[in-house]
Amino acid sequence: MDMKTKPLPEKLQGLRINGPRLWDALMELAQIGATPKGGVCRLTLTDLDKQGRDLVSRWAREAGMTVTIDKIGNGFLRRPGRNNALPPVVTGSHIDTQPTGGKFDGNYGVLAGLEVVRTLNDAGIETEAPIEVAWWTNEEGSRFVPVMMGSGVFAKAFTLDHAYAAKDTDGKSVKDELERIGYIGEQEPGDHPIGCYFETHIEQGPVLEDNDKTIGVVTGVLGIRWYDCVVTGMEAHAGPTPMALRKDALQVAAKLMQEVVACAHRHPPHGRGTVGMVQVHPNSRNVIPGRVKFSIDLRNANDALCDAMDADIRAVAAKLSAESGLPIEITPVSAYPAQPFHPELIAAVGRAAETLGYSNMPAVSGAGHDAVYMARLAPAGMIFIPCKDGISHNEIEDAKPEHITAGCNVLLHAMLERAGVAG
Ligand SMILES: [Zn+2]
């Protein structure tokens, strides 16, 4: 049987999740680590994280799911299918938050998966392939580096030992903290089949809201290039040095900084260019700046476009250097490849949004997600919903109940399409 493109049977097209129940679950989980300003502070591998994991595990067991924990503390909540030899259709996200986190980032993706299962239970629907809901350890990376730790270990982007050794500012290690909260499991990370992977997430940007759309059909995650740039001039007194005889590093740097933004505009629609850090030496009111160091962050939808932006900014820098006579050095700091999502999963999300009658548009993710690592292992896709003013990683992060419901309905239909329905 080809489950890849089979539309849902007519009788299932009317199936909907229970929006208020999902909302209540989100609000209950948000009580754990609730902040006075209405946000959530539930850092990874803390006592609060343990309480969150315990609550989600209890809900999963009450929904008839089994709970498996792997050695990095990722959780897999499983609802069997009719044919359990098939790899599961998986959805998930994370339940750790930033110190000034909100109620929805990550938590929505996990609880939307749970709501899909509760809905299938209510309707007495058996899927062909099993369904799983995953939480990934330490997605946020605010207490322990690197970010997206659990899914990264699972996808073998780095080793379990590397993750275990990471320490927080108090010197506590990931391994010790996993043991302490009782979430160091038996299963080898990655030793767990994934048929395909969906992740539902708030957009964390303003595009859907700006376009008045309910669903973002995510086509991929932007590639990222980070650089340090140094322009070297010559310090001299601001008074006695005539304009023609100066080597003012900041004036040249300022031109190049503007070119970083212009470069993004030259590579639309997804080009991004940001200078976020600037150090001026000697940073004195009456001294011509002799040295300026600044960061460059370039992003685009595929690696070829990232390469093109790299070549563009280097050519501009060479031209500015030749014109000014000042050396300009551009050093790569790190690079993350763009991650396109799987065409079939993108199509499944788009089809579900259309069937359900939700306004939708293609979207790209400028931020990293666990789905990026899953896409290396299996077909992956994401569903975005708007969040208020595009704000996240902030206690005022907010999403509308109708959007929360809509995203979960899309997840339900897309997962059912992929899992197939028994009988
Ligand atoms: Zn997130």
Image (spheres, helix red, strand yellow):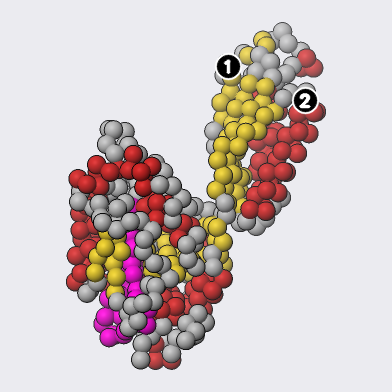
Q: The residue under label 2 is which amino acid type?
A: Ser
The Cα atoms of the two marked residues, 2 and 1, are separated by: 20 Å
Q: The residue under label 1 is which amino acid type?
A: Pro
What residue is rendered at 66% in x and 41% in y? 260
The residue carrying pointer 2 sits among few (fewer than 14), some (14 to 19) or many (20 or more) residues within 10 Å by Cα, namely some
Q: Position of residue 406 (x, y in %)?
A: 41, 73
Q: Earlier in the sequence, mark 2 or mark 1?
A: 1
- Secondary element under disc 1, as helix, strand or loop, is loop
Callout 2 touching callout 1 (CB < 8 Å): no
What residue is rendered at 65% in x and 57% in y? 269
Closer to us: 351 or 341 = 341
Closer to us: 379 or 40 = 379
Residue 407 to residue 240: above or below: below
Q: Position of residue 111 (x, y in %)?
A: 31, 65
Would you name the residue on which mark 1 appears? 282
Tell me, yes or no, if residue 23 can be seen here.
no
Q: Position of residue 318 (x, y in %)?
A: 76, 33
What residue is rendered at 31% in x and 37% in y? 168
Q: Which residues make up the magenta segment?
A: 111-137
Quarter of the picture containing the C terminus is bottom left
- Secondary element under disc 2, as helix, strand or loop, is helix
Residue 246 to residue 37: above or below: above
Is residue 117 found inside the magenta-colored segment of the image? yes
Mark drawn on residue 324: 2
Q: Quarter-wise, where is residue 332 in the image?
A: top right
Is residue 54 found inside the magenta-colored segment of the image? no
